[in-house]
Image (spheres, helix red, strand yellow):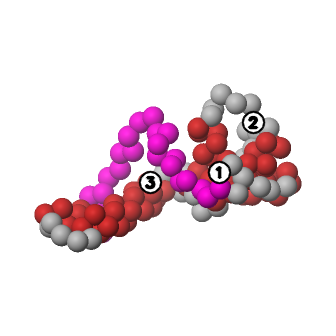
Amino acid sequence: MPGSPARHLIFDHLKEAIVLDFNENSGMRLIFESLIEEYKKDGPACAAMMTALMNQCLIEVLREAEAQSGGVLPWLSALDDPRLSQVVDAILDHPEQAYTVETMADIAAMSRATFIRHFEKCFARTPMD
């Protein structure tokens, strides 16, 4: 899949629910109120607006997950780099395959050294860890 766009479907592979406390987050309340109001409407662009609001909700969930973890969710950083996202997607899609640094670098369309450097920066560990 080198060269294909990153899918960012990391949530398709979650084994359990993400549970977060949004009591102190007034922004999330506003998003949900907007979603409810949009749901009540029946007209053009309602689906597009609800999609946009759900994307905003997802961003808030990711931000809050990072904040509540004390900044220790390195996999979120992979979403910022489409090349690393492709590697994460491949591993999650096919965990049974044996991955080497070389095969992961190929998926990311990077040289071995560049891949190692980017991976270590993002995940604070080596690719084989």
Q: Position of residue 44 (x, y in %)?
A: 23, 71
Magenta span: predominant SS is loop
Q: Which residue is mark 2?
A: 99
Residue shown at 52% from the left, 47% from the top: 10
> Under tag 3, what secondary structure?
helix
* Inter-mark Cα distance, 2 to 3: 28 Å
Any part of residue 33 in sight: no
Farthest residue, direction bottom = 44
Which label's residue is closer to the chain start, 1 or 2? 1
Work out which residue is located at the far front of the displayed protein and give it: 44
- At label 1, counting other C-alpha atoms closer than 10 Å, the crowd grade (few under 14, some 14-19, many 20 or more) is many
The amino acid sitting under disc 2 is Tyr
Q: Which residue is mark 3?
A: 65
Determine whether the residue tagged by mark 1 lies in a helix, strand or loop. helix
Of 21 and 27, the residue lying toward us: 27
Question: In this picture, which residue range is highlighted in magenta?
Answer: 4-30
Residue 85 part of the magenta-drawn span: no
Going 35% across and 50% down the picture, which residue do you hit? 20
